[in-house]
Amino acid sequence: MQDQRRHQRIRFGVPPSVKIGFSGIVGEGLIENLSLSGLMVRSSMNLEIGRLAGCEFSIFSSPLIDVPVTIVSKVGDLYGGRFQTGPINQIVIEDAIDAALAKGEASILSVHELSGRKVMRISGGLNGALRNDFMHALTRVGVNEIDMSGVTALDQPGLALCLVATSRHGVEIGEQSECFAAAWKTALARPGSGETAT
């Protein structure tokens, strides 16, 4: 789970839609995750590995992004595409990702080793959409601490993941953003949380 990718994958609480053009056919899909270099799209279209497709999407309130992608992988109805972008599209994509993270509409989960300890860092939204990556990091990678300093929004399923991490896996909550600290304090004060406020 230690992410060695050149660009971090961005996950969404609500997957944005994407219009796809391929071999003269226009269809729809949902963006499962996004990075500066490409995206994963779920679509019923029959896309072919190694071929170009056109993608047109907006990340919530971002300007429309119209970019060709090379299809590089397929698992069922999930396709991986690598962007064929110029500098302007790259800037638009980066700005859209930054805005979505700041509003908590998108999330990044990464695991790093710091001073011999594995630290999970969450930026953007802490929500139930992170469940699979979060639980993989806890159970397969082994995490000592979670850095919440980059959290900009959170929901009850996101807090529940943290309660599982601390009460069942002995993980410490490290640095905290203001919004996370307030919600965490409230969550710990609830009867049955399995924790006590610190």
Image (tube, rainbow, N blue to C red):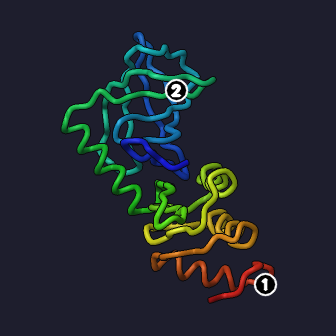
Q: Residues within 10 Å of mark 2 (few under 14, many from 20)?
A: many
Q: Is residue 78 above or below residue 88?
A: above
Marks 1 and 2 in Cβ contact (< 8 Å): no
Q: Is residue 131 above or below residue 153?
A: above
* Residue 13 percent across, percent down from the top left: 55, 52
For residue 79, the mark is 2
Q: Is residue 56 above or below residue 59?
A: above
Amino acid residing under circle 2 = Tyr
Q: Residues within 10 Å of mark 1 (few under 14, many from 20)?
A: few
Q: Name the residue at the left extreme.
A: 87
Residue at x 51% of width, y 64% of height: 116
The C terminus sits in image quarter: bottom right
* Residue 87 percent across, percent down from the top left: 19, 37
The foreground one among 90 and 147 is 147
What kind of element bears circle 2?
strand
> As drawn, is 63 to the left or to the right of 40?
left
The foreground one among 144 and 68 is 144
Residue at x 52% of width, y 75% of height: 174
Which residue lies under the disc numbered 1? Answer: 191
Disc 1/disc 2 C-alpha distance (Å)? 44 Å
* Residue 76 percent across, percent down from the top left: 63, 23
Residue at x 31% of width, y 32% of height: 66
Residue at x 45% of width, y 33% of height: 18
What kind of element bears circle 1?
loop
> As drawn, is 95 to the left or to the right of 5?
left
Q: Name the residue at the top extreme.
A: 23
* Residue 71 percent across, percent down from the top left: 44, 21
